[in-house]
Image (spheres, helix red, strand yellow):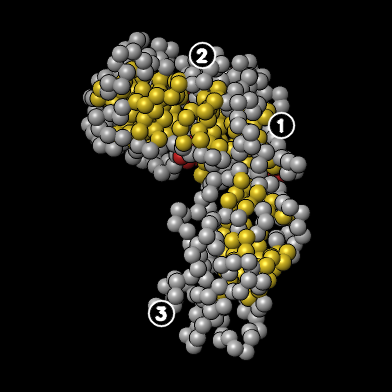
């Protein structure tokens, strides 16, 4: 979650005592060189249940500082803005006051604190609250509790005619639940169990992969739970385990195998594997994995077909290593195409793995899907009757990693059109997006009940949703839910749901509402709001590359 904008503390000027000059607002660059330094920063505010996102170097904004004609008093928050969780607690907010920009105000000086609407002091004190300076020209506010929601929250401090303010930005509330969704669930979205999570946890970010879902909690630690369902109508028993790593799940490269429960992660330039037993009843094993000879990877993939970890390095070379056995961690370069590569992905199969690469020459390369053989040398796969024009630009893939199931490769050619690797490669699937796909992301997301939906490609562009059905040779069509449902919202993401139920789509709008269709592109899809969504929901920033669609659901009220 990004920090709120941090501007200067606002000082409202009032009638000043006769002995004081006009008040000015000073910034670090505008202060006069002869001005003494401001009072030392004593401490920063502490927010319970939230990661502090301010810069490590403490900062202060003076208001007012010395005027050109003489010294003036100052009143300032030690930290001019705060970020905290809804329903969370803000502690140790410090306010400094001086008589002339350098000398502390005397003990006994009164500073009055006014909280934003809905905020309250934990100890029961009422707002406005008068606090008395005791030493060092400062006061420390009692702990402050935030409401469930608030827009434009500003806390005020007043002393005489001086007024200083500090903004408070609220993040997701304490008590937020994670919901998993699929058209086979009853209802569509179910709250995941919290088994194993520490007391007082708070979700910061989520990264769903094909096999596991990773979350970062408020303390920065990375946790994992099983993603695969045990039945077609429920998420199955979910137990959360700590990986022992500290990382932002949404910003971390993660790829998972759906069957062997092995995940590959890139954290701070270093590879790690997280392995869980097939029953998910024991704590996962987190182990380091040596980087390829080409250095830290820039993209990764995991396949259970043969059992391989894949990595692309910054020099555009592609590497593989067995996921188990004595050769694990010994990387071999995959060859047969000119480097640096343009794009790549791994197509998982039953006992086989196909590596698809767009080489530096913009041509299409892959290996034959030979059972039991780890790909090592690729060949040019252009069909003699192919209609696509080189150079190719990119593949249809999921949001984050480079491994998925399904059949063949969908790719964009030099004309901004999409073709498929199967057959004669002469069928243009661009449809209503003809000539427009060169800069657009083509989403090929996993499903929960089979491989058929992997042949459905989604594009989100300009707030609208498009889909192409490769299996049934249906080119891209606009399948955006009608405005009578969206009510001004736009589509921001899409996710396949399940091939066993007519191949449906989840579409996520800009209000985090999830809409479900009755079909993909065969006829006109009929959309309805997904069942089971929480009243306060948030899907923003979740990496939707798992078998389910995920949203965060806030509580209806703050926990007592």
Residue that badge 3 annotates? 34
Residue at x 22%, y 31% (from the top left corner): 338
Residue at x 53%, y 65% (from the top left corner): 7
Quadrant assignment, res 340: top left
Residue at x 54%, y 61% (from the top left corner): 79
At mark 1, the secondary structure is loop
The correct choice, above or below, for 135 with respect to 21 in the image is above
Residue that badge 1 annotates? 531
At mark 3, the secondary structure is loop
Numbered label attached to residue 503: none
Q: Nearer the viewer, residue 164 or 1?
A: 164
Which of labels 1 and 3 is toward the front?
A: 3
Q: Nearer the viewer, residue 143 or 221?
A: 143
Q: Nearer the viewer, residue 244 or 389?
A: 244
User: Residue 252, image x and y in percent?
Assistant: 44, 36
Left or right side of 108 for 449: left
Disc 3 or 2, which lies upstream in sequence? 3
Residue that badge 2 annotates? 278
Residue 306 showing in the rendered view:
yes
Q: CA distance from mark 1 to mark 3?
A: 66 Å
């Amino acid at each position: 979650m990004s920090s709120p904008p941090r501007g200067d503390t606002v000082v409202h000027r009032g009638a000043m005592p006769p002995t004081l000059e006009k008040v000015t607002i000073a910034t670090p660059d505008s202060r006069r060189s002869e001005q003494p330094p401001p009072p030392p920063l004593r401490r920063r505010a502490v927010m319970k249940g939230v990661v502090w996102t301010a810069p490590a170097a403490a900062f202060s904004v003076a208001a007012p500082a010395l005027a050109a004609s003489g010294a003036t008093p100052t009143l300032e928050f030690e930290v001019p803005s705060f970020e905290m969780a809804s329903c969370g607690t803000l502690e140790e907010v410090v306010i400094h006051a001086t008589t002339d920009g350098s000398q502390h105000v005397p003990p006994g000086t009164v500073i009055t604190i006014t909280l934003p609407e809905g905020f309250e002091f934990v100890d029961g004190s009422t707002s406005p609250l008068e606090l008395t300076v005791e030493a060092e020209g400062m006061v420390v506010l009692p702990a402050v509790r935030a409401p469930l929601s608030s827009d434009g929250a500003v806390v005020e401090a007043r002393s005489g005619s001086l007024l200083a303010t500090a903004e408070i930005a609220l993040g997701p509330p304490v008590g937020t639940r994670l919901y998993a969704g699929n058209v086979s669930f009853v209802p569509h979205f179910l709250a995941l169990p919290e088994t194993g999570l520490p007391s007082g946890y708070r979700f910061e970010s989520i990264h769903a992969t094909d096999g596991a879902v990773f979350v970062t909690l408020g303390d920065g630690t990375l946790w994992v739970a099983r993603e695969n369902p045990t039945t077609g109508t429920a998420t199955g028993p979910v137990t959360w385990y700590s990986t022992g790593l500290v990382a932002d799940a949404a910003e971390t490269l993660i790829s998972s195998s759906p069957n062997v429960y092995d995940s590959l992660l890139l954290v701070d330039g270093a590879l790690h594997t997280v392995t869980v037993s097939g029953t998910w009843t024991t704590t996962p094993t987190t182990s380091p994995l040596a980087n390829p000879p080409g250095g830290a990877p820039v993209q990764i993939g995991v396949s259970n077909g043969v059992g391989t970890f894949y990595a692309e390095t910054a020099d555009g070379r592609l590497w593989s290593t067995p996921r188990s056995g004595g050769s694990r961690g010994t990387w071999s370069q995959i060859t047969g195409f000119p480097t640096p590569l343009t794009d790549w992905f791994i197509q998982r199969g039953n006992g086989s793995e196909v590596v698809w690469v767009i080489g530096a020459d913009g041509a299409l390369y892959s290996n034959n899907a030979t059972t039991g053989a780890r790909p090592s040398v690729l060949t040019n796969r252009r069909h003699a009757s192919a209609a696509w024009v080189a150079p190719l630009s990119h593949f249809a893939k999921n949001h984050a990693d480079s491994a998925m199931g399904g059949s063949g490769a969908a790719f964009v050619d030099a004309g901004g059109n999409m073709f498929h690797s199967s057959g004669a490669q002469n069928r243009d699937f661009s449809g209503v997006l003809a000539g427009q796909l060169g800069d657009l992301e083509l989403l090929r997301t996993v499903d929960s009940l089979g491989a058929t939906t992997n042949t459905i490609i989604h594009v989100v562009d300009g707030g609208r949703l498009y889909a192409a059905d490769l299996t049934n040779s249906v080119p891209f069509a606009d399948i955006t839910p009608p405005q009578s449902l969206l009510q001004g919202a736009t589509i921001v993401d899409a996710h396949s749901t399940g091939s066993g139920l007519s191949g449906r789509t989840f579409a996520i709008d800009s209000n985090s509402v999830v809409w479900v269709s009755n079909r993909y592109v065969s006829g006109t899809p009929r959309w309805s709001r997904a069942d089971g969504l929480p009243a306060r929901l948030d899907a923003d920033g979740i990496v939707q590359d798992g078998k389910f669609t995920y949203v965060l659901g806030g509580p209806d009220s703050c926990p007592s």
